[in-house]
Image (cartoon, grey):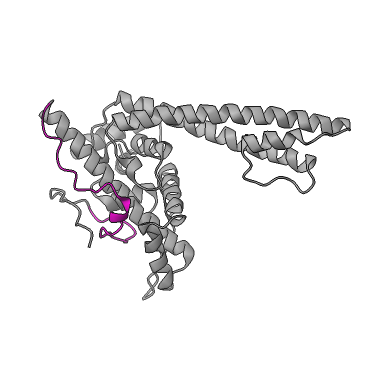
Amino acid sequence: MPPKLSAQVRVFATGNGRKTDPVDAHSVAMAAFHNHGLLHVEVDDDLLVLGMLADRRDELGRARTQTVNRLHRLLLELLAGGPKKDLSAKQARELIVTVKPRDLPGKTRRRLAVELIGERESIDRKIKTGDKEIEALVLERDSTLMDLFGIAAASAVRLLVDVGDIHRFANRDRFASWNGTAPLDVSSGNQERHRLSRVGNRRINRTIYIMAINQLRHRTEGRAFYDRHRAGGMPSMMALRVLKRRLSNVIFARMLADQTRREARVATGPGGHSGNDSVSSAVDSHLGIDSSEKPHPGPASTKPRTGLPAAS
């Protein structure tokens, strides 16, 4: 139940308007009774398992970052000039062998550094094992998100878990508004301006940001798209925002095609046709899809959803 619907019932109800559990329950029931177009939530055991694995993967990633930072701080005190920032566990172990402090504080720092190197190696092994398990489950779910440039197993599982049923979004504009890539309109008078949105699902927004950065680091269509906007005089941060908005459309189209194909296969049963996936597996062909840059989607349409226009 969207909070805005139950809030409207509570505002227009008689009484003192206090927000209590009984009042909330009544407001939710009234809103659900009068809104027949709401999505019925169904528990998906596979997504629950993927959600637990995705949360565990995020926890391991944060633990690894903390371990790397603590190790780097100790090495700065042990080595003259300090080590490089992107030091691998193997390089750190080879480097710590050359350090032979004579004083007690130095020996203690070296011992703690060796322990942190062991912790990092253990975390790296757990992350590697977890990524393999997640990747197998994502492929078992017949998802092709990992075919998109810049989306690894951890990003794909986060998209599947947080999005759930992609059909709950009426169109790609509402999906962009939900993940925070749709810009906010801050126009005044005749001056039309948009700024970066700070609302929406921040985990999915971060996933799209990582995808955009990976696209910019390689010779991809995303990089060419970004360079075209920069050449037209657009600031770098605004060009990155526009790229994220376009990649949101790419992800929406891919998830929509995957789920439609999966539902068609389930409906036809074994031996049936899996349906036609009109979305190519090459991410470079997606960025040409026409997209709306409007900040917020308009009213939901009751017309049947049509396919996205082909890239020009």
Image quarter hosting the N terminus: top left
- Let me know if residue 287 is in the magenta part: yes
- Residue 85 x/y as whole percent: 65, 46
In the image, residue 130 lies at what x, y percent?
46, 28
Q: Nearer the viewer, residue 179 or 12?
A: 179
Q: Quadrant of residue 29?
A: top left
| Farthest-out residue, bottom | 190
Going 33% across and 43% down the picture, which residue do you hit?
147
In the rendered structure, which segment of residues is drawn in magenta? 271-299
Taking the spot 47% from the left edge, 68% from the top edge, the residue there is: 235
- For the point 82% across and 34% down, the residue is 100
Horizontal relation, residue 120 to residue 225: left or right: right
The residue lying at 42 percent from left, 53 percent from top is 215
Looking at the image, which is closer to me, 251 or 137? 137
How many numbered discs sit on the rendered protein?
0
Q: Is residue 273 left or right of residue 49?
A: left
Q: Residue 8: x, y in percent?
A: 31, 44
Give the dominant element type of the magenta stretch: helix, strand or loop: loop
Residue 80 in sight in this render: yes
Is 94 placed left or right of 185 in the picture? right
Please state the horizontal and vertical placement of residue 217, each as a whole percent of the image.
Answer: 47, 55
Most foreground residue, 265 or 159: 265
- Residue 35 in view (yes/no): no
Instruction: Quadrant for residue 241, please give it.
Output: bottom left
Q: Locate the C terminus by quadrant.
A: bottom left
Q: Is residue 179 magenta?
A: no
